Amino acid sequence: MVLKSKSVVLRASLIASGIVVLDQISKLQASNVTSNPGVGLGLAAQYISQPMVVVLTLFILFALWFFARDWWQRFPYAAGLFCGGALSNMLDRVFFGGVRDWLEVPVFGLRNNFADWAIFLSLIWILRTTLVRAAQKETT
């Protein structure tokens, strides 16, 4: 059990590190970067400070690490995507005063970044897997 746990942590950590590196490099290479001081599509920018968002992010990651071990052990790849995205966006907030967005989302007029997509994909992955497993349990 201990070896499995170390293997899961290693996989999640490698994915998280890869997301942070990919996201930060992409932001350095992009020519149309904008700073987003808000959370989730720029919401609440006028109501929440950057230090508050950083503390909230750290709290969420701490809670996931210590109180939701079952979650990240069942979904190590999704946990790596989620944590990597959250850490990369948190680095932006600490060093740039907001999340640097550069990927344009067609039709919606929004911008985001690789870290945002990693977080989104991790949540979709967990939701889909959970629903599939629940459906399989009902059929057996």
Image (cartoon, helix red, strand yellow):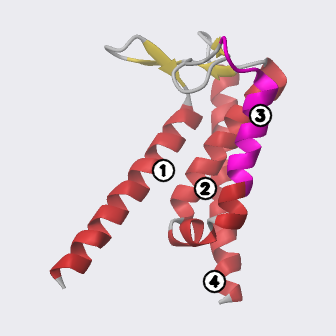
Check residue 4 in the rendering and tell me which mark sits there, or answer none.
4
Q: Residue at x 63, y 19 (%)?
A: 38
In the rendered image, the quadrant that contains the C terminus is: bottom left
Q: Nearer the viewer, residue 61 or 96?
A: 61
Q: Earlier in the sequence, mark 2 or mark 1?
A: 2
Identity of the amino acid at label 4?
A: Lys
Check residue 54 in the rendering and tell me which mark sits there, or answer none.
3
Disc 2 and disc 1 in contact, CB within 8 angstroms = yes
Q: Earlier in the sequence, mark 1 or mark 4?
A: 4
Q: How far across and how far down the image is residue 94, in percent?
A: 82, 27
**Which SS does the magenta portion mostly show?**
helix
Please tell me in which quadrant of the rendered image residue 113 appears: top right
Residue at mark 2: 80
Q: How far across and how far down the image is residue 51, in percent?
A: 81, 27
Q: Nearer the viewer, residue 80 or 62?
A: 62
Q: Is residue 85 above or below residue 5?
A: above
Q: Residue at x 72, y 65 (%)?
A: 66
